[in-house]
Image: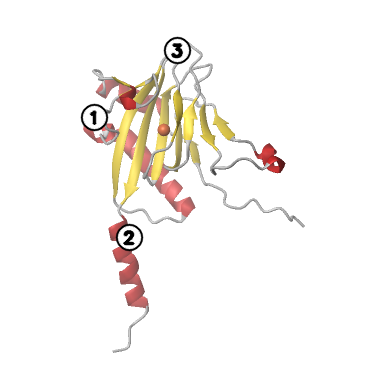
Amino acid sequence: MNYIHNIFPIPVYLNQVKDPVALDQEITNKLTNIRWIAGAGLDDPHRITTASYYDDIIMDASLSVFQAELDIHLRAYANSLLFPLTEYSRASWLAEYDLNEYSTVHDHGTADISGVYYYKTCSKGGEFFFERPGTAHTAHAYADIGDRYTIRPQPGLLIMFPGWMRHGVTRNLSGECRRILSFNLWFDRTSAIRKEIADAKSRYSTPS
Ligand SMILES: [Fe+2]
């Protein structure tokens, strides 16, 4: 009998897109004049395409191939979470990391689902990692659980995760430029709650 229960697992989505070449071409062709911004106030040397983190480059640049691919993966992720998809607001941006550039550990605030898509990766360094949630990692007996989960990105990899999960990027140790498309999604809770109320009312009639 298994008497160890690993409770509170966090479902993180990791999958390859169907046609990474098509996505790369779309991003490259539609974004010929990218205006890169250094750091946007974070203590990071890498560059991004948004100052506010509330722009939506997928919509602004009409990245329809990426949008279609995102729809497929988002539905698969939501199905596995038993989460009924609703309308959502989105922010999205590009980021690039040259030699020695990295990202300090951060989270994506109130975003329901955050994601990152890799369309150019580097051969050395530039790993994506999650930090183990929880503030106090002081219990010596559990040291083997580890504090980091590291992923070596390949071109075409899509990762989605809860926006509160803290993560970062290790230093790019190669001369190749690492480029990503990141996004945040916020689902419309009002419509979901209205549906919940309507469903409940149709199931249970209140005696008058
Ligand atoms: Fe991030």
Q: Amino acid at mark 1?
A: Ala
Query: In the rendered structure, which disc, 2 or 3, sits on the residue that comes first in sequence?
Result: 3
Find residue 179 and report its horizontal and vertical position in percent: 39, 22
Find residue 39 and report its horizontal and vertical position in percent: 34, 23
Q: How much space separates mark 2 and mark 3, taking CA atoms? A: 45 Å
Q: Residues within 10 Å of mark 3 (few under 14, many from 20)?
A: some
Identify residue for label 1. Answer: 61
Point out which mark residue 16 bears: none
Q: Residue visible at 61% across and 53% down?
A: 7
Q: Residue visible at 57% across and 49% down?
A: 9
Q: Residue visible at 58% across and 42% down?
A: 136
**Which structural element holds mark 2?**
helix
Point out which mark residue 192 bears: 2
Identify residue for label 3. Answer: 99
**Which structural element holds mark 3?**
loop
Task: Please state if 58 lies on the left or on the right of 142 as rendered.
Answer: left
Q: Residues within 10 Å of mark 2 (few under 14, many from 20)?
A: some
Looking at this view, is 164 or 94 the one in front? Answer: 164
Task: Please state if 136 lies on the left or on the right of 74 as rendered.
Answer: right
The quarter in which the C terminus is drawn is: bottom left
> Where, by quadrant of the figure, is residue 17 drawn?
top left
Q: How much space separates mark 1 and mark 3, taking CA atoms? A: 27 Å
Q: Amino acid at mark 2?
A: Ala
- Residue 13 vertical position relative to residue 78 in the rendered view, above or below: above
Q: Residue furthest right?
A: 1
